[in-house]
Image (spheres, coloured by chain):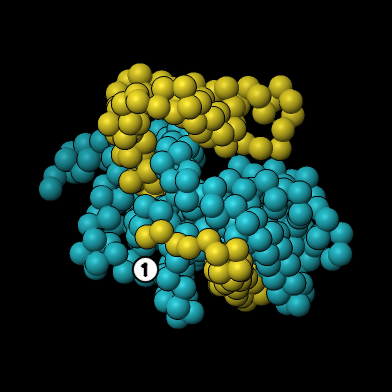
Chain colours: A yellow, B cyan
Amino acid sequence: MIAALTLLLACQLAGEALARLFALPIPGPVIGLALLFLGLRLREQWRPDATPIDELPLGAVCGVLLAHLSLLFVPAGAGIVRHAGALVAHGPGLIAALVISTALTLVVTAFVFVRVAALVDSAPEN
Amino acid sequence: MTPLDLARVETLWVYLAADPLLWLTVTLAAYVAADRISAALGRHPLANPVLIAVAFLAAILLATKTPFETYFQGAQFVHFLLGPATVALALPLHRHWPIVRKAALPILAALLAGAFTAVVSAVGIAALFGAPYPVLAALAPKSVTAAIAMGVARGIGGEPSLTATLVIATGILGAVMVTPLMVLFRFTDWRARGFAAGLAAHGIGTARAFQVNPVAGAFAGIAMGLNGLVTAALVPLILTLF
């Protein structure tokens, strides 16, 4: 459990270090994600018969973190109280932009995904 | 209650209000309550746990006149876990890699179309309402994860703290709207639904996707990561038009 959490933090730390070292515009945790993903792929290549990740403590730790991803956004969300005034001050334009743009982005993204998937015959596997 | 007791209660409050323990506990309690409410309402999209917990906390902070900085002293321990949780997204990506690889083309096409739509529609609508340039610059990267969005906004002359608020608001709006919109337009492909949630509403949309379906969650995580990169490149180009 502790080893798994250490591995996650080490990936993030390596990501932060790489981002600063090479002045990358990508946040450290996203680079950490890529590093861990690469590690998992290599592990599967080299040791295909190793214990599946989901049965290791790493699987359990990641499962808990991702099952409660909502919780982790609560402190930043509460920060809205500081700037709620600014949102209202900029009037209906800003609110309209947020609502319409977010709805439009959701629909356009899903629509293009579904259409291109149908074109290249990439069937959903649910 | 005698005056002495009142004074004691006041002293206790002064101690507690400044102690990280209180606000960490309140944050967790607000989330547990919000999650129970969300579960009791069958995970209805409007009963979003982030939205409910933030509403509770906002009410408590305003009622107790607690400065956000004091609150964050306690809440930072929860906030800190966002980093390792982002790294943890590697696991669902690895687990669903065969499905992801087969969907490379739809992913690429939806990524470009979605990233462009997110920036142009937001900036376009706000500009129509006469929003000044610094507000447009703060708004442009609203769909990507806060760390990237704030960096992008700063780079083009937007106010990073306004961006942080707009990012959170977009995340909550997207998480609330995604299911009704997908049902309305009859999109049944979990890959497309998850990808849209992560692209439009970053981590909060991804949290919603994991709530609904594991494949949707994996695709939301991919969309969040990729859109961060594309938006960082796209926003400075598009903003030169406004």
Secondary structure under tag 1 reads loop
- The residue lying toward the viewer, choosing from B232 and B213, is B213
Q: Residue furthest bottom?
A: B184
* Res. B33 visible in picture: yes
**Residue located 73% across and 77% down the image:** B129
Picture quadrant where residue B63 is located: bottom left
The front one of B98 and A105 is B98
Q: What residue is drawn where x is 45% and y is 62%?
A: A124
Task: Specify the quadrant that holds the N terminus of chain A.
Answer: top left
For residue B56, above or below residue B185 = above
Give the amino acid at mark 1: Pro
Give percent across and percent down for residue A66: 37, 43
Q: Residue B178 location, x and y as percent? A: 46, 68
What number of labels is visible?
Answer: 1
**For the point 49% across and 79% down, which residue is it?**
B185
Q: Residue B59: horizontal and vertical position, in percent?
A: 37, 58
Compared across the picture, whether B166 is left or right of A10 comes to: right
Q: Quadrant of residue B138?
A: bottom right
Depth check: give the residue in front, B220 or B53: B220
Residue occupied by mark 1: B45
Q: Which residue occupies 33% across, 46% down? A: A67
Label 1: chain letter? B
Q: Where, by quadrant of the figure, is residue A107 drawn?
A: bottom right
In-image side of B43 versus B97 (left or right): left
Query: Badge 1: how crowded within 10 Å, few (<14), some, or many (20+)?
Result: some
Kindly tell me whether residue B24 is visible in this rendering. Answer: no
Looking at the image, the residue that sits furthest to the right is B240
In the picture as drawn, the residue positioned furthest to the left comes out as: B1
Residue B20 higher or lower than A86, as above or below: above
Indicate the quadrant containing the C terminus of chain A: top left, top right, bottom left or bottom right: bottom left
